[in-house]
Image: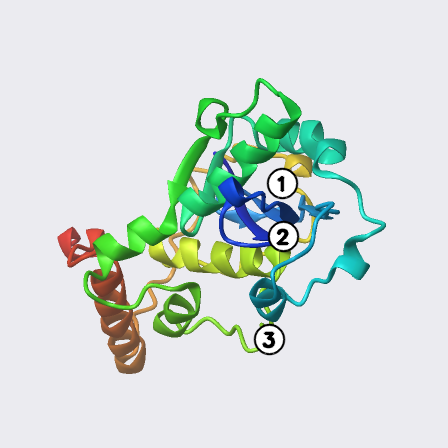
Amino acid sequence: MRQIVLDTETTGLEPKQGHRIIEIGCVEIINRRLTGNNFHYYLNPQRDIDEGAVEVHGLTTEFLSDKPLYEDIAESFFEYAKGAEVIIHNAAFDVGFINHEYRLMGSEHSDMASWCNVTDTLHMARNMFPGQRNSLDALCKRFEINNSHRKLHGALLDAEILADVYLMMSGGQHSLFAEESTSNIEFKTKTFDENRPSLPIIKATKNELSEHVERLAMLRESSGGECVWDKVN
């Protein structure tokens, strides 16, 4: 399964008011491992940036003045993300801006949902934790994910953090940065000698059993009260 975790930064809140994407950041996950095959660009919006937006992400018109336009990277992004499951926190915001950018180009790719599957982690979180705060920062705190290096919002940094959050929300496994792309890994089937000696049985200690119970409790809470390991005798 190929998944892309995506975030954007923008000049403001509404594409209908002419606001544009100024940063797009994506990380790739294959088989629940971050591959390092990232997609990241700063973009020249060809317009001013709202003062409130600058306070959030710190990106200025001056910094972006020599960066590529969205139309310069549009086809590369389409090829990178098409056919994947694209995971976004508050997807309506980012998808709305991406569709707007393609519409401005007169592109046939102006409906992102037609060329990839979009998963909204905000929707997931609201189902898992109804009535609670479900911002990215709140979820980091809930899952004990360190985001202390996040002084300002940044598309690539937030995508990396969201990848950790998503892996915890969807199964409890995170921070799996691979040293190299999984495309370079060979999988081989191994058979065992039927005459091999019996393996010793090592029983869990009291501390290990206690930690196991605590871990199941955390999985039960994060999955809405169900845990597959409860069904194992």
Q: Position of residue 163 (x, y in %)?
A: 50, 54
Q: Quick one: label 2, few (<14), some, or many (20+) residues within 10 Å? A: few
Who is closer to the viewer here, 108 or 115?
108
Give the structural element (helix, strand or loop) at label 3: loop
Q: Which is nearer the eye, 127 or 166?
A: 127
| Number of the label disc, if any, that sits on residue 151 | 3
| Quadrant of the drawing holding the C terminus | bottom left
Distance in Å between CA atoms under marks 2 and 3: 26 Å
- 44 left or right, relative to 141: right
- Report the front residue among 231 and 146: 146
Please tell me how crowded label 3 is: few (under 14), some (14-19), or many (20+) other residues with Cα within 10 Å: few
Q: Residue 180: image x %, image y %?
A: 70, 47
Dot 2: what SS? loop
Q: Residue furthest top?
A: 108
The amino acid beneath tag 2 is Ala
Disc 1 designates what residue?
182
- Residue appearing at x 45%, y 46% in the figure: 93
Is 55 rendered above or below residue 199? below
Q: Residue at x 53, y 73 (%)?
A: 147
> Can residue 21 be seen in the rendering of this structure?
yes
